[in-house]
Image (tube, helix red, strand yellow):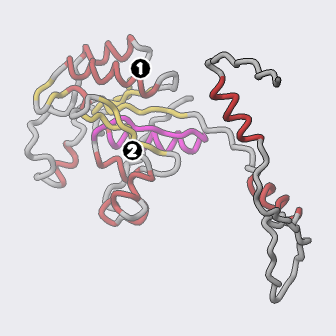
């Protein structure tokens, strides 16, 4: 009498064992023979092939591709110098506000300049008087002295932060910044100008950037040559609308 096979107890791994066994069971399908054809570098009319394995690319082509992906060593970045146009930061709208100045200054040091040197520039006494004499309508909507930003507390805060303060009587801050920018570039530095004044866009280049306070979002935002070209569809040197602005050469030198 045949002996019945021993009962197999149910196991939680039984389904996995059955699936593995099914995968290992050979299928009774028609055998397919694969044939690899040798690679030929030149062929005017390649013969059809039934190979299911693609031919490998030539070795020289692979080396060429790899060689093209190699990058040249990156050049060391030039050190940066920040010029801070202080006067516009001392206003909230048309009203003077030391709170606005303190807030923008704190954000500037903590998120923008970090460890790079900063030079603060203010309008000098009678900074725009010579332009008003030449053109009486120049900034006629502004009361005289409104843009000087000469509050002694502002200067004290800047000096307390070890920030040098530059003020040249008879010249506005933008003229001084433009002159100092040219001098610093000649020394091999990059320049970042912190100001909401859009006239500084004419100074933008590969080595000159702007960082502008944006009240709507409460932060500083960088504006570079790439942004300028995307906005105006031209290079700053080719924009004729900016050619009338020429910075005055001042006899003030910055030691770095």
Q: Which residue is mark 2?
A: 223
Q: Is 165 located above or below residue 24 in the figure?
A: above
Residue 190, given in percent of the width and then of the height, sits at 53, 40
Is 213 left or right of 227, judged from the image as shown?
Answer: left
Q: Is 25 located above or below residue 33 in the figure?
A: above
Residue 139, given in percent of the width and then of the height, sits at 14, 46
Residue 177 can be seen, yes or no: no
Residue 41, given in percent of the width and then of the height, sits at 88, 76
The CA distance from mark 1 to mark 2 is: 18 Å
Q: Which residue is mark 1?
A: 110
Q: Secondary structure at mark 1?
A: helix
Residue at the extreme top: 160
Q: Which residues are magenta?
A: 174-196
- Can you tell which quarter of the image residue 242 is in? bottom left
Q: Secondary structure at mark 2?
A: strand
Q: Which label's residue is closer to the chain start, 1 or 2?
A: 1
Residue at the extreme bottom: 44
Write the residue at 40% across / 44% down. Answer: 178
- The answer to whether marks 1 and 2 mark residues whose Cβ atoms lie closer than 8 Å is no
Write the residue at 38% across / 54% down. Answer: 228
């Amino acid at each position: 009498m045949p002996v019945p096979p021993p009962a197999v107890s149910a196991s939680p791994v039984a389904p996995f064992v059955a699936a593995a066994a099914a995968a290992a069971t050979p299928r009774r399908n028609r055998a397919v023979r694969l044939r690899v054809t040798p690679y030929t570098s030149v062929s005017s009319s390649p013969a059809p092939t039934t190979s299911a394995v693609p031919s490998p690319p030539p070795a020289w082509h692979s080396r060429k591709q790899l060689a093209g992906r190699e990058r040249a060593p990156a050049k060391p970045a030039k050190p940066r110098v920040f010029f801070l146009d202080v006067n516009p930061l001392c206003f909230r709208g048309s009203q003077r506000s030391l709170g606005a100045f303190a807030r923008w200054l704190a954000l500037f040091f903590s998120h923008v300049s970090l460890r790079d040197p900063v030079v603060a520039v203010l309008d000098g006494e009678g900074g725009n008087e010579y332009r008003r004499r030449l053109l009486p309508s120049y900034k006629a909507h502004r009361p005289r002295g409104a843009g000087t930003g000469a509050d002694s507390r502002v200067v004290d805060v800047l000096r307390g932060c070890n920030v040098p303060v530059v003020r040249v009587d008879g010249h506005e801050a933008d003229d001084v910044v433009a002159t100092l920018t040219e001098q610093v570039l000649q020394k091999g530095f990059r320049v970042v100008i912190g100001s909401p004044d859009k006239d500084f866009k004419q100074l933008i280049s590969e080595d000159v950037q702007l960082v502008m306070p944006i009240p709507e979002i409460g932060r500083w935002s960088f504006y570079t040559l790439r942004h300028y070209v995307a906005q105006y569809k031209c290079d700053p040197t080719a924009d004729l609308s900016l050619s009338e602005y020429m910075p005055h050469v001042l006899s003030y030198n910055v030691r770095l």
